[in-house]
Image: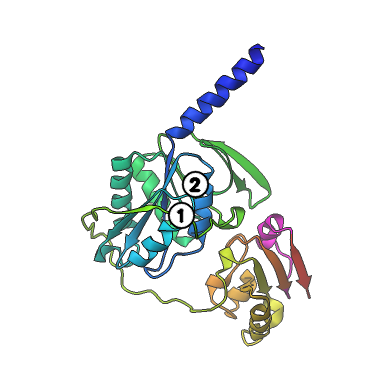
């Protein structure tokens, strides 16, 4: 009887605690459309319990805010528009995030574990004087997270006692949140004053109709055995038939066959879909990729 009463009290306490949880998801976008990994971060945020809000900072990003307002599980979309956010510089975004957290008293702040999130969240955590948790793959409770360590050879369960939990989310470990059925309110927030420590000049992107590597369900990867960048066309043709993304090994990137944004593995992008690897020699640099990815088809 005492055990049953104790269990009920624990469940009641956990439920009460979740009511006070609130999470701010930093949306990654292009001012025109939402980056898919943000939907994975939203799914992770919903697992924490409590209210989930999204912050959209950019220039002329009303379209992104409208898109987010329809995503299931979001209660509020906060929009800040200013020319200073044109390049999504962490130096300029951090004061906005800090002011938003202070205004709404969020207990958690997260973003996708992309180049954007990995560049931004450590700075936010430093300003809050808390330790960030990077690249989580599972949420056990509002203060307990799982991430990989030792190049994917082990899993680490982290209990975070910080006043504000700041973490990045590995997109392939969480399903994308449904993009229809939501009815979040959209609110304008005041843009922070320009910091002026850095200046955005330009951004050169490789345009492709194929899925982005970190969010693709199928990836076709090529290695040094393809001999040249021209032979990667064989992979492009195959990928188009499979609606897949195209990746490359470190050796292929170092040889100049393809640009470095196509690199997968420990020093590249971590992916965990069905993977087809062609002419990739098994080296330690790719070991993390193989440990995480159980659906591998290799061709030599």
Q: 30 or 294, which is in the foreground?
A: 30
In the rendered structure, the answer to whether residue 278 lies left or right of residue 244 reads right
Q: Is residue 134 visible?
A: no
Tell me the residue at 50%/60% (across/down): 179
* Magenta-highlighted residues: 278-294
Q: Is residue 8 visible?
A: yes
**Mark nearer the viewer, 1 or 2:** 1
User: How is colour applied across the structure in the image?
Assistant: rainbow
Tell me the residue at 48%/49% (across/down): 73
Q: Position of residue 204 (x, y in %)?
A: 41, 77
| Disc on res. 45 | 2
Above or below: residue 182 compared with residue 83: above
Tell me the residue at 65%/60% (across/down): 272
Q: 89 or 150, which is in the foreground?
A: 89
* Mark 1, secondary structure of its residue: loop
Q: Where is residue 159 in the image (x, y as percent from the top left)?
A: 54, 34
| Disc on res. 191 | none
Graded by Cα atoms within 10 Å as few (under 14), some (14 to 19) or many (20 or more), the crowding at tag 2 reads many
Graded by Cα atoms within 10 Å as few (under 14), some (14 to 19) or many (20 or more), the crowding at tag 1 reads some
Which residue position holds label 1? Answer: 182
Above or below: residue 156 compared with residue 258: above
Q: Which tag, 1 or 2, sits closer to the chain's start?
A: 2
* Numbered-mark total: 2
User: Which quadrant is home to the C terminus?
Assistant: bottom right
Tell me the residue at 36%/58% (across/down): 56
Residue 280 included in the magenta stretch of the image: yes
For the view shown, which residue lies furthest in the top direction?
A: 2
Q: How far apart are marks 1 and 2 (CA)?
A: 15 Å
In the rendered structure, the answer to whether residue 41 lies left or right of residue 185 reads right
Above or below: residue 169 compared with residue 104: below
Q: Position of residue 83 (x, y in %)?
A: 25, 66
């Amino acid at each position: 009887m005492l055990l049953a009463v104790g269990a009920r009290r624990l469940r009641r306490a956990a439920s009460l605690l979740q009511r006070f949880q609130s999470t701010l998801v930093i949306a990654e976008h292009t001012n025109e459309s939402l980056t898919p990994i943000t939907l994975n971060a939203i799914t992770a945020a919903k697992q924490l319990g409590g209210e989930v809000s999204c912050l959209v900072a950019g220039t002329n990003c009303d379209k992104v805010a409208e898109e987010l307002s329809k995503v299931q599980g979001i209660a509020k979309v906060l929009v800040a528009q200013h020319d200073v956010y044109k390049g999504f510089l962490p130096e300029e975004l951090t004061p906005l995030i800090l002011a938003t957290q202070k205004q709404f008293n969020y207990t958690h702040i997260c973003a996708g574990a992309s180049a954007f999130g990995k560049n931004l969240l450590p700075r936010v955590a430093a300003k809050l004087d808390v330790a960030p948790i990077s690249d989580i793959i599972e949420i056990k409770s509002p203060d307990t997270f799982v991430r990989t360590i030792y190049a994917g050879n082990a899993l680490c369960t982290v209990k975070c006692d910080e006043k504000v939990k700041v973490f990045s989310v590995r997109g392939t470990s969480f399903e994308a949140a449904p993009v229809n059925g939501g009815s979040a309110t959209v609110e304008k927030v005041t843009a922070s004053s320009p910091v002026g420590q850095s200046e955005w000049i330009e951004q050169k992107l490789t345009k492709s109709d194929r899925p982005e590597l970190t969010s693709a369900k199928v990836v076709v990867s090529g290695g040094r055995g393809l001999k040249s960048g021209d032979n990667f066309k064989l992979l492009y043709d195959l990928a188009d038939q499979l609606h897949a993304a195209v990746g490359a090994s470190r050796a292929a990137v170092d040889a100049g066959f393809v640009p470095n944004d196509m690199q997968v593995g420990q020093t590249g992008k971590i992916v965990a879909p069905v993977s087809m690897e062609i002419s990739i020699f098994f080296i330690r640099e790719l070991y993390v990729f193989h440990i995480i990815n159980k659906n591998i088809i290799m061709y030599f």
